[in-house]
Amino acid sequence: MLILKKEATVEIEVRKSRFIAHAIPITSLDQIKSLVQKAREEHPQAVHVVHAAVVGPKGDLYSFSDDKEPRNTAGRPAFEVLKGSGISNILVLIIRYFGGILLGTGGLVKAYGQSVRELLPLLETEELIEKTAFRVTVPYNLYELLKLQLVSLEAEIESEEFTTDVTITATLPATDIEDLNLYVRNLTNGGASLIVE
């Protein structure tokens, strides 16, 4: 299963109607309502803000909405394309500006599905790997060695705090935590270990 790493947007035009598809990384279906509301505020002239979302390690939690388009002509076709992509933890908002020409139910299904299809190649994803957050504090003279080890393990460093010692907050694939803890204990002669958050 892949997860979305960062936001992406594409715009298509179908018979003078503009469809702006915007992908956002999410971790819970609870986030959808506020993101839809934010899109409405950013696009006050838009007639519809349709959404489709897939969440969870198996991609088995989902949500979609037609937002006053005829039933199953907007959210469902967008969701079906999204579901087939194998990407999870993703919300796609499709913002429609009406161009004055009615598309009919078939035209709507095609336009909303096409919006997501055109967005997919632009998405930056990564493998869904369980990650563990941790903190570790080491003396200055060991900072560079620890930093090299973190880079080699592809840890995502969130912050570095330089006081009398150096405290690093980061995340790492859960499978590498024990090895890193052993490395830190050896590096500091037992003086430091990871604090898992």
Image: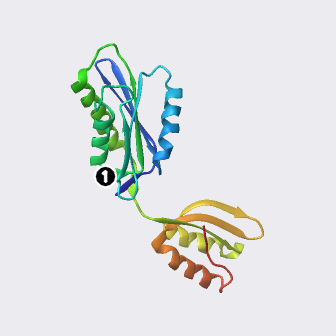
| Residue in front for this viewpoint, 73 or 165 | 73
For this view, does 59 lie left or right of residue 110?
Answer: right
Residue 59, x across and y down, in percent:
35, 54
Tell me which residue sits at (45%, 73%) in the image.
175
Count every numbered label the image shows and give the total.
Answer: 1
| Residue in front for this viewpoint, 45 or 75 | 75
For this view, does 158 lie left or right of residue 19?
Answer: right
Amino acid type shown at disc 1: Gly
Tell me which residue sits at (66%, 62%) in the image.
160
Residue 116, x across and y down, in percent:
32, 37
Say which element carries label 1: loop
Residue 5, x across and y down, in percent:
44, 51
| Residue in front for this viewpoint, 192 or 87 | 87
* Above or below: residue 30 compared with residue 133: above
Disc 1: which residue: 86
Residue density around tag 1, few if under 14, some if 14–19, many if 20 or more, within 10 Å = few
Of all residues shown, which one is farthest toward the right?
164
- Residue 118 appears anywhere in the view: no
Of all residues shown, which one is farthest toward the front?
71
Residue 76, x across and y down, in percent:
30, 37
Which quadrant of the figure contains the C terminus?
Answer: bottom right
